[in-house]
Image (cartoon, rainbow, N blue to C red):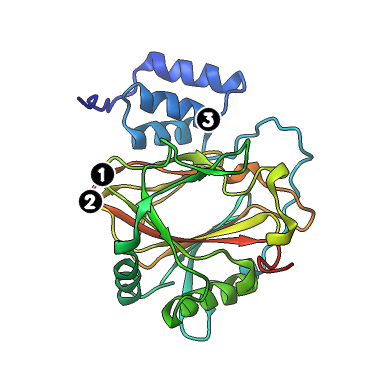
Amino acid sequence: MEKEKINQIPVGLMDWIIKTLNSGVHPEAIVDAMIREGYDARLSYTTLFRIVGNKPIETPGVQAPYEYEQPAIAKKGSKIPTSDREIKVLSIVEQPFIMHMDNFLSYEECDELIELSKDRLKPSTVIDHKTGEEKAATGRTSKGMSFIIGENQFIKKIENRIAELTEFPQENGEGLQVLNYGIGEEYKSHFDYFPSNKVDPAKGGQRVGTFLIYLNEVESGGETVFPKAGVSIVPKKGSAVYFQYGNSKGQVDRMSLHSSIPVAEGEKWVATKWIRHGNIYQQ
Protein backbone atom coordinates (compact mmCIF):
# COMPACT_ATOMS: atom_id res chain seq x y z
CA MET A 1 0.00 0.00 0.00
CA GLU A 2 1.41 3.40 -1.01
CA LYS A 3 2.59 5.54 1.89
CA GLU A 4 0.40 8.61 2.55
CA LYS A 5 2.16 11.82 1.54
CA ILE A 6 3.28 14.17 4.35
CA ASN A 7 2.34 17.78 3.58
CA GLN A 8 3.95 19.69 6.46
CA ILE A 9 7.61 20.22 7.36
CA PRO A 10 8.23 20.10 11.15
CA VAL A 11 10.65 22.60 12.72
CA GLY A 12 13.05 19.82 13.69
CA LEU A 13 13.32 18.69 10.09
CA MET A 14 14.01 22.26 8.91
CA ASP A 15 16.91 22.44 11.38
CA TRP A 16 18.21 19.09 10.13
CA ILE A 17 18.03 20.24 6.48
CA ILE A 18 20.03 23.40 7.23
CA LYS A 19 22.63 21.46 9.23
CA THR A 20 22.91 18.81 6.50
CA LEU A 21 23.29 21.42 3.75
CA ASN A 22 26.03 23.16 5.73
CA SER A 23 27.87 19.84 6.06
CA GLY A 24 28.20 19.69 2.25
CA VAL A 25 25.52 17.15 1.40
CA HIS A 26 24.02 17.77 -2.07
CA PRO A 27 20.50 19.29 -2.02
CA GLU A 28 19.15 16.65 -4.40
CA ALA A 29 20.23 13.91 -1.97
CA ILE A 30 18.27 15.65 0.80
CA VAL A 31 15.17 15.94 -1.38
CA ASP A 32 15.37 12.28 -2.42
CA ALA A 33 15.64 11.28 1.25
CA MET A 34 12.59 13.38 2.15
CA ILE A 35 10.53 11.86 -0.66
CA ARG A 36 11.54 8.35 0.43
CA GLU A 37 10.32 9.19 3.95
CA GLY A 38 6.90 10.10 2.57
CA TYR A 39 7.11 13.88 2.18
CA ASP A 40 5.29 15.39 -0.80
CA ALA A 41 7.74 15.89 -3.71
CA ARG A 42 6.71 19.46 -4.50
CA LEU A 43 6.84 20.42 -0.82
CA SER A 44 10.31 18.88 -0.52
CA TYR A 45 11.69 20.86 -3.47
CA THR A 46 10.08 24.18 -2.51
CA THR A 47 11.36 23.82 1.05
CA LEU A 48 14.92 23.41 -0.23
CA PHE A 49 14.48 26.35 -2.62
CA ARG A 50 13.30 28.56 0.24
CA ILE A 51 16.20 27.59 2.48
CA VAL A 52 18.91 28.26 -0.11
CA GLY A 53 17.25 31.49 -1.24
CA ASN A 54 16.96 30.37 -4.86
CA LYS A 55 20.75 30.69 -5.24
CA PRO A 56 22.97 28.10 -6.90
CA ILE A 57 24.60 25.75 -4.42
CA GLU A 58 28.28 25.08 -4.95
CA THR A 59 29.24 21.42 -4.76
CA PRO A 60 32.73 19.96 -4.68
CA GLY A 61 34.10 18.26 -7.77
CA VAL A 62 37.37 17.14 -9.27
CA GLN A 63 37.12 19.05 -12.55
CA ALA A 64 38.23 22.65 -13.05
CA PRO A 65 35.45 25.21 -12.57
CA TYR A 66 33.08 25.14 -15.52
CA GLU A 67 33.61 28.11 -17.84
CA TYR A 68 30.30 29.53 -19.01
CA GLU A 69 29.99 30.61 -22.63
CA GLN A 70 26.95 32.46 -23.92
CA PRO A 71 25.04 30.14 -26.29
CA ALA A 72 23.99 31.46 -29.68
CA ILE A 73 20.31 31.14 -28.72
CA ALA A 74 20.84 33.60 -25.84
CA LYS A 75 21.74 36.40 -28.25
CA LYS A 76 18.48 36.32 -30.22
CA GLY A 77 16.26 38.54 -28.07
CA SER A 78 12.88 37.92 -26.47
CA LYS A 79 11.07 37.00 -29.71
CA ILE A 80 12.94 34.62 -31.98
CA PRO A 81 11.74 34.19 -35.56
CA THR A 82 12.36 30.90 -37.36
CA SER A 83 11.51 30.06 -40.96
CA ASP A 84 8.00 28.92 -39.95
CA ARG A 85 7.24 30.19 -36.44
CA GLU A 86 8.02 32.96 -33.92
CA ILE A 87 9.15 31.71 -30.51
CA LYS A 88 8.61 33.78 -27.35
CA VAL A 89 11.29 33.67 -24.65
CA LEU A 90 9.74 33.52 -21.16
CA SER A 91 12.85 33.45 -18.99
CA ILE A 92 16.61 32.85 -19.02
CA VAL A 93 18.89 31.58 -16.25
CA GLU A 94 22.55 32.14 -17.04
CA GLN A 95 24.26 29.65 -14.70
CA PRO A 96 23.38 26.95 -15.55
CA PHE A 97 22.06 28.17 -18.89
CA ILE A 98 18.31 27.48 -19.01
CA MET A 99 15.98 29.15 -21.52
CA HIS A 100 12.22 28.71 -21.13
CA MET A 101 10.20 29.39 -24.32
CA ASP A 102 6.55 29.50 -25.33
CA ASN A 103 4.92 28.75 -28.67
CA PHE A 104 7.59 26.36 -29.88
CA LEU A 105 4.97 23.90 -31.15
CA SER A 106 1.33 24.58 -31.97
CA TYR A 107 -1.30 22.56 -30.13
CA GLU A 108 -1.95 20.66 -33.37
CA GLU A 109 1.75 19.79 -33.70
CA CYS A 110 1.82 18.56 -30.09
CA ASP A 111 -1.19 16.32 -30.71
CA GLU A 112 0.32 14.95 -33.92
CA LEU A 113 3.61 14.11 -32.19
CA ILE A 114 1.77 12.24 -29.43
CA GLU A 115 -0.35 10.37 -31.98
CA LEU A 116 2.72 9.32 -33.99
CA SER A 117 4.50 7.98 -30.92
CA LYS A 118 1.84 6.39 -28.69
CA ASP A 119 1.86 2.96 -30.37
CA ARG A 120 5.68 2.74 -30.22
CA LEU A 121 6.22 3.35 -26.50
CA LYS A 122 8.44 1.02 -24.47
CA PRO A 123 9.78 1.23 -20.89
CA SER A 124 12.41 3.99 -20.72
CA THR A 125 16.10 3.34 -20.10
CA VAL A 126 18.93 5.40 -18.61
CA ILE A 127 22.66 5.73 -19.26
CA ASP A 128 24.71 3.99 -16.58
CA HIS A 129 27.30 6.59 -15.53
CA LYS A 130 29.80 3.85 -14.68
CA THR A 131 29.55 1.78 -17.85
CA GLY A 132 27.96 4.20 -20.31
CA GLU A 133 25.47 1.51 -21.32
CA GLU A 134 21.70 1.86 -21.49
CA LYS A 135 19.79 0.02 -18.78
CA ALA A 136 16.38 -0.13 -17.14
CA ALA A 137 16.24 1.82 -13.87
CA THR A 138 13.77 2.45 -11.07
CA GLY A 139 14.70 6.15 -11.16
CA ARG A 140 13.11 6.56 -14.60
CA THR A 141 9.60 5.17 -14.68
CA SER A 142 8.28 6.61 -17.92
CA LYS A 143 7.66 4.97 -21.29
CA GLY A 144 9.36 6.27 -24.40
CA MET A 145 10.29 5.90 -28.05
CA SER A 146 12.71 7.53 -30.48
CA PHE A 147 12.21 8.69 -34.04
CA ILE A 148 14.87 8.12 -36.65
CA ILE A 149 16.50 11.41 -37.59
CA GLY A 150 14.52 12.90 -40.47
CA GLU A 151 12.05 10.01 -40.26
CA ASN A 152 9.30 11.99 -42.02
CA GLN A 153 8.55 15.56 -43.09
CA PHE A 154 6.85 16.41 -39.81
CA ILE A 155 9.84 15.27 -37.73
CA LYS A 156 12.20 17.09 -40.13
CA LYS A 157 10.23 20.30 -39.55
CA ILE A 158 10.66 20.06 -35.77
CA GLU A 159 14.35 19.17 -36.09
CA ASN A 160 14.91 22.12 -38.38
CA ARG A 161 13.18 24.50 -35.95
CA ILE A 162 15.43 23.30 -33.12
CA ALA A 163 18.51 23.71 -35.33
CA GLU A 164 17.52 27.26 -36.28
CA LEU A 165 17.03 28.23 -32.64
CA THR A 166 20.16 26.64 -31.19
CA GLU A 167 22.41 27.07 -34.26
CA PHE A 168 23.62 23.52 -33.81
CA PRO A 169 23.33 21.65 -37.16
CA GLN A 170 20.61 19.00 -37.41
CA GLU A 171 23.29 16.32 -37.77
CA ASN A 172 24.54 17.13 -34.25
CA GLY A 173 21.19 16.08 -32.77
CA GLU A 174 20.14 12.61 -31.69
CA GLY A 175 16.78 11.25 -32.80
CA LEU A 176 13.80 13.02 -31.28
CA GLN A 177 12.57 11.06 -28.25
CA VAL A 178 8.99 11.15 -26.90
CA LEU A 179 8.26 10.23 -23.26
CA ASN A 180 4.99 9.54 -21.46
CA TYR A 181 4.67 9.67 -17.66
CA GLY A 182 1.62 8.30 -15.83
CA ILE A 183 0.55 9.03 -12.25
CA GLY A 184 3.46 8.56 -9.84
CA GLU A 185 6.01 8.23 -12.63
CA GLU A 186 9.15 10.36 -12.56
CA TYR A 187 12.78 10.74 -13.59
CA LYS A 188 15.00 11.23 -10.55
CA SER A 189 17.90 13.72 -10.47
CA HIS A 190 20.36 13.05 -13.27
CA PHE A 191 22.72 14.58 -15.83
CA ASP A 192 22.13 14.28 -19.58
CA TYR A 193 25.80 14.25 -20.55
CA PHE A 194 27.86 11.04 -20.84
CA PRO A 195 30.52 9.79 -18.39
CA SER A 196 33.86 11.17 -19.60
CA ASN A 197 35.21 7.68 -20.33
CA LYS A 198 32.20 6.82 -22.51
CA VAL A 199 32.29 9.78 -24.91
CA ASP A 200 32.65 8.51 -28.49
CA PRO A 201 34.25 11.11 -30.83
CA ALA A 202 33.14 9.03 -33.82
CA LYS A 203 29.50 9.57 -32.86
CA GLY A 204 29.47 13.30 -32.25
CA GLY A 205 31.32 13.27 -28.96
CA GLN A 206 29.83 14.61 -25.75
CA ARG A 207 26.26 15.84 -25.36
CA VAL A 208 26.28 19.61 -24.88
CA GLY A 209 22.60 20.58 -24.67
CA THR A 210 19.04 19.33 -24.27
CA PHE A 211 15.92 20.67 -25.98
CA LEU A 212 12.82 19.62 -24.02
CA ILE A 213 9.30 20.18 -25.41
CA TYR A 214 6.08 19.90 -23.38
CA LEU A 215 3.30 18.25 -25.40
CA ASN A 216 0.35 18.52 -22.99
CA GLU A 217 -0.97 20.20 -19.86
CA VAL A 218 -0.32 18.20 -16.66
CA GLU A 219 -3.11 18.49 -14.10
CA SER A 220 -0.72 18.29 -11.15
CA GLY A 221 2.98 17.50 -10.73
CA GLY A 222 5.47 16.67 -13.45
CA GLU A 223 7.56 19.84 -13.10
CA THR A 224 11.10 19.88 -14.44
CA VAL A 225 13.34 20.80 -11.51
CA PHE A 226 16.95 22.02 -11.49
CA PRO A 227 17.72 21.57 -7.77
CA LYS A 228 21.17 23.18 -7.76
CA ALA A 229 19.81 26.31 -9.44
CA GLY A 230 16.53 26.62 -7.55
CA VAL A 231 14.50 26.43 -10.79
CA SER A 232 11.20 24.62 -11.32
CA ILE A 233 9.33 24.69 -14.65
CA VAL A 234 5.66 23.76 -14.94
CA PRO A 235 4.73 21.88 -18.13
CA LYS A 236 2.70 23.94 -20.61
CA LYS A 237 1.54 22.53 -23.92
CA GLY A 238 3.68 23.77 -26.80
CA SER A 239 6.35 25.36 -24.59
CA ALA A 240 9.99 24.25 -24.45
CA VAL A 241 13.13 24.43 -22.36
CA TYR A 242 16.67 24.50 -23.70
CA PHE A 243 19.52 23.96 -21.28
CA GLN A 244 23.19 23.81 -22.20
CA TYR A 245 25.81 22.01 -20.16
CA GLY A 246 28.81 21.65 -22.48
CA ASN A 247 31.32 24.28 -23.61
CA SER A 248 33.98 24.59 -26.32
CA LYS A 249 36.65 23.38 -23.89
CA GLY A 250 34.98 20.00 -23.47
CA GLN A 251 33.81 20.71 -19.92
CA VAL A 252 30.40 19.71 -18.57
CA ASP A 253 28.29 21.71 -16.13
CA ARG A 254 27.29 19.86 -12.95
CA MET A 255 24.84 22.67 -12.17
CA SER A 256 22.67 21.17 -14.94
CA LEU A 257 21.47 18.38 -12.65
CA HIS A 258 17.70 18.03 -13.15
CA SER A 259 14.71 15.80 -12.54
CA SER A 260 11.08 15.32 -13.52
CA ILE A 261 9.06 15.09 -10.32
CA PRO A 262 6.22 12.55 -10.08
CA VAL A 263 2.97 13.20 -11.91
CA ALA A 264 0.25 13.64 -9.28
CA GLU A 265 -2.78 13.90 -11.58
CA GLY A 266 -3.26 13.22 -15.28
CA GLU A 267 -0.29 12.31 -17.46
CA LYS A 268 2.73 14.03 -18.97
CA TRP A 269 3.98 13.95 -22.55
CA VAL A 270 7.34 15.46 -23.52
CA ALA A 271 9.71 15.33 -26.47
CA THR A 272 13.48 15.54 -26.04
CA LYS A 273 16.30 16.28 -28.47
CA TRP A 274 19.84 15.72 -27.18
CA ILE A 275 22.49 17.75 -29.00
CA ARG A 276 26.11 16.62 -29.31
CA HIS A 277 29.30 18.58 -29.85
CA GLY A 278 29.79 17.27 -33.38
CA ASN A 279 28.22 15.41 -36.27
CA ILE A 280 26.84 12.08 -35.00
CA TYR A 281 27.38 10.58 -38.47
CA GLN A 282 31.07 11.39 -38.74
CA GLN A 283 33.34 8.43 -39.47
Question: Which residue position holds label 2?
Answer: 266
Q: Residue at the location (64% across, 67% down)?
A: 172
Q: Where residue 77 appears, x then y in whole percent?
A: 58, 73
State which tag comes first along the sequence, 1 or 3: 3
Amino acid type, callout 3: Pro
Q: Quadrant of the N terminus?
A: top left
On the rendered image, what quadrant is the C terminus found in? bottom right
| Crowd band around label 3 with a 10 angstrom C-alpha radius: few (<14), some (14–19), many (20+) | many
Where in the figure is residue 5, as x and y percent of width and height? 25, 28
Q: Percent position (x, y) of residue 273?
A: 52, 62
Residue where numbered disc 3 is placed:
27
Q: Where does label 1 land, which residue? A: 183
Q: Answer few, some or many: residues within 10 Å of disc 2's Cα (few below 14, many 20 plus, some between 14 and 19).
A: some
Q: Where is residue 63 in the image (x, y as percent from the top left)?
A: 76, 38
User: Residue 117 occupies which quadrant of the picture?
Assistant: bottom left
Q: Earlier in the sequence, mark 2 or mark 3?
A: 3
Seen from the viewer's position, the closer of residues 35 and 275 is: 275
Q: Which residue is drawn at 35% across and 70% down?
A: 113
Q: Mark 2 or mark 1: which comes first in sequence?
A: 1
Circles 1, 3 touching at the beta carbon (< 8 Å): no
Look at the picture and state if 254 lies above or below 279: above
Q: How far apart are marks 2 and 3 (CA)?
A: 28 Å
Work out whether 185 lies above or below 244.
above
